[in-house]
Image (cartoon, helix red, strand yellow):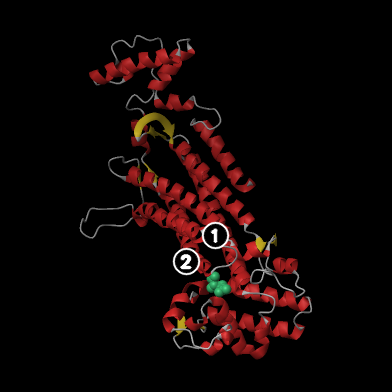
């Protein structure tokens, strides 16, 4: 990005009532163009819609509006081709683009800011930006959900130890485990869809805070910008950033889930577990230990969850003591929002690479699924099904497990099991769990097929 260091107070749209130029350190301190230039596309779209609406309403002459629109389109090209010189003295993306317009088309450019304020402008730009990014993120999430459902179907018969307390608990299938991840992310998608729907309203027309006396058509501005509706209160429209907070909240939850999934990939790929291997192209090495292959990608996803939680807390704190309406505090909303977008989208992208690419060590997983007396619950269940109260059945089997452990043998090799039931193999244990949400291979295949439909339905 190119910056102009020169102090150019005469170009400041608000300079009229000031007798002295802004102190240079204050200019630096208050400027946001270093980061909000990222909103240039939305800012130009917002201005074009505003100019069109003003012309349709007879507030601007049609020729003026056309010159403004053409000028703004040329500025967009300039920005995209790296020809725009951003000036810190012009504070932000809005005043930089407006100044560029005046330079390009002269005094007509000065008519654009009729019936609006940077307050409704920035509130509109940011909503437009977030709506687009959320739509992109939702596309990525859908792809990841699909990859999970497909991989779950492939692993429907893959036995593995299911854990509670990180201790071996009961046999499950890997497909079932992957569908647990699917459910987590599907809810995250729902939260993002909800917040997208709630932020889909256009603040334009709210102006500084009190609306405007010009004969504007707010519905038309909203329509031109693709908003579902118009924000209903001018003071609320320029002031609240709850839509940013809600996005960061949904993102924090998504990152929490991705971090849990990442943690499992890290554990599973450790030789201590050896459940899976990650492919070389998704791992990195050590600069000192020549033999190392590290799961840095899931580790970084786990690590990056921290910054998104931080952004959520920043925004909540930024907002909580602001009196109505707009306060400059709100300029601090952008960097947390931008970094959340970048972080979450990158992490979902990484998972879309990881999910289809890891190798499940099926033989080892099957062996482990048959270890550690993990079908003891099935044994107790059989006794209970025969009429023994479950608590008694639990005690009988627990005592048998204690004896087997002392003898160092599996349950079915105990001298006398003293119960009229068979110790189940892990495959039989999972096969019995055919109910909705169960881990039986058939149930998993069915759930995976439904999962693919649920992605499309929602
Ligand atoms: N750069 C400002 C922001 O991001 C734009 C709005 C400025 N409004 C004002 N009244 N100073 O919030």
Within 10 Å of the Cα at label 2, are there few (<14), some (14-19), or many (20+) other Cα atoms?
some
Question: Does residue 301 sit above or below 375 in this rendering?
Answer: below
Q: Is residue 77 left or right of residue 370?
A: right
Q: Is label 2 in a helix, a strand or a loop?
A: helix
Mark 1 and mark 2: Cα distance apart in space: 11 Å
The x, y position of residue 108, in whole percent, is: 68, 87
User: Which one is in front, 433 or 50?
Assistant: 50
Number of numbered discs visible in the structure rendering: 2
Q: Is label 1 in a helix, a strand or a loop?
A: helix
Q: Residue at x 37, y 26 (%)?
A: 374
Q: Is residue 139 left or right of residue 169?
A: right
Within 10 Å of the Cα at label 1, are there few (<14), some (14-19), or many (20+) other Cα atoms?
many
Q: Is residue 320 left or right of residue 391?
A: right
Which of the numbered marks, if any, corresponds to residue 335? 2
Which of the numbered marks, if any, corresponds to residue 244? 1
User: Which one is in front, 6 or 15?
Assistant: 15
Q: Residue at x 56, y 55 (%)?
A: 138
Question: Does residue 433 sit above or below 265 in this rendering?
Answer: above
Whether the residue carrying mark 2 lies under 8 Å from ligand 1 is answered with no
Q: Residue at x 48, y 39 (%)?
A: 180
Question: Does residue 297 sit above or below 128 in this rendering?
Answer: above
Question: Does residue 51 sit above or below 380 in this rendering?
Answer: below
The x, y position of residue 434, in whole percent, is: 53, 27
Decide if residue 436 is in sight here.
yes
User: Which one is in front, 288 or 230?
Assistant: 230
Q: Quadrant of ligand 1?
A: bottom right
Q: Mark 1 or 2 closer to N-term?
A: 1
The x, y position of residue 429, in whole percent, is: 44, 25
């Amino acid at each position: 990005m190119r910056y102009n260091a020169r102090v150019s107070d005469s170009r400041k749209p608000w300079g009229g009532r000031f007798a002295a130029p802004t102190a240079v350190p204050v200019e630096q301190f208050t400027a946001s163009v270093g980061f909000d230039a990222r909103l240039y596309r939305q800012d130009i779209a917002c201005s074009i819609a505003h100019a069109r609406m003003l012309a349709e309403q007879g507030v601007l002459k049609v020729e003026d509006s056309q010159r403004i629109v053409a000028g703004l389109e040329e500025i967009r090209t300039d920005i995209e081709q790296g020809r725009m010189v951003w000036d810190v003295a012009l504070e932000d993306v809005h005043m930089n683009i407006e100044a560029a317009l005046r330079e390009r088309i002269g005094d007509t450019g000065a008519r654009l800011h009729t019936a609006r304020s940077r307050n409704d402008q920035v509130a509109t730009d940011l909503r437009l930006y977030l709506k687009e990014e959320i739509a992109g993120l939702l596309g990525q999430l859908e792809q990841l959900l699909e990859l999970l459902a497909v991989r779950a179907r492939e692993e429907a018969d893959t036995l593995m130890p299911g854990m509670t307390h990180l201790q071996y608990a009961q046999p499950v299938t890997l497909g079932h485990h992957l569908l647990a991840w699917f459910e987590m992310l599907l809810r995250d998608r729902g939260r993002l869809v909800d917040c997208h729907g709630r932020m889909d309203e256009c603040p334009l027309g709210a102006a500084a805070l009190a609306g405007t006396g010009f004969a504007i058509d707010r519905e038309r501005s909203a329509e031109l910008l693709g908003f579902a509706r118009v924000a209903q209160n001018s003071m609320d429209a320029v002031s609240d950033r709850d839509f940013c907070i809600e996005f960061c909240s949904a993102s924090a939850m998504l990152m929490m889930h991705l971090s849990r999934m990442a943690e499992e990939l890290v554990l599973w790929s450790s030789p201590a577990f050896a459940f899976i291997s990650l492919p070389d192209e998704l791992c990195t090495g050590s600069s000192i230990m020549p033999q190392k292959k590290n799961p840095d990608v899931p580790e970084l996803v786990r690590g990056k969850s921290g910054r998104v939680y931080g952004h959520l807390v920043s925004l909540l704190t930024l907002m909580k003591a602001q009196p109505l309406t707009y306060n400059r505090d709100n300029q601090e909303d952008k960097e947390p929002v931008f970094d959340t977008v970048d972080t979450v989208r990158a992490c979902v992208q990484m998972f879309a690479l990881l999910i289809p690419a890891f190798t499940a060590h099926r033989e080892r997983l099957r062996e482990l699924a048959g270890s550690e007396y993990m079908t003891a619950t099935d044994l107790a269940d059989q006794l209970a099904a025969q009429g023994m109260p479950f608590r008694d059945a639990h005690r009988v089997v627990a005592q048998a497990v204690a004896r087997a452990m002392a003898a160092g043998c599996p349950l079915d090799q105990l001298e006398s099991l003293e119960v009229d039931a068979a110790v189940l193999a892990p495959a039989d244990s999972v096969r019995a769990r055919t109910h909705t949400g169960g881990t039986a291979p058939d149930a998993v295949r069915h759930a995976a097929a439904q999962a693919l439909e649920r992605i499309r339905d929602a």
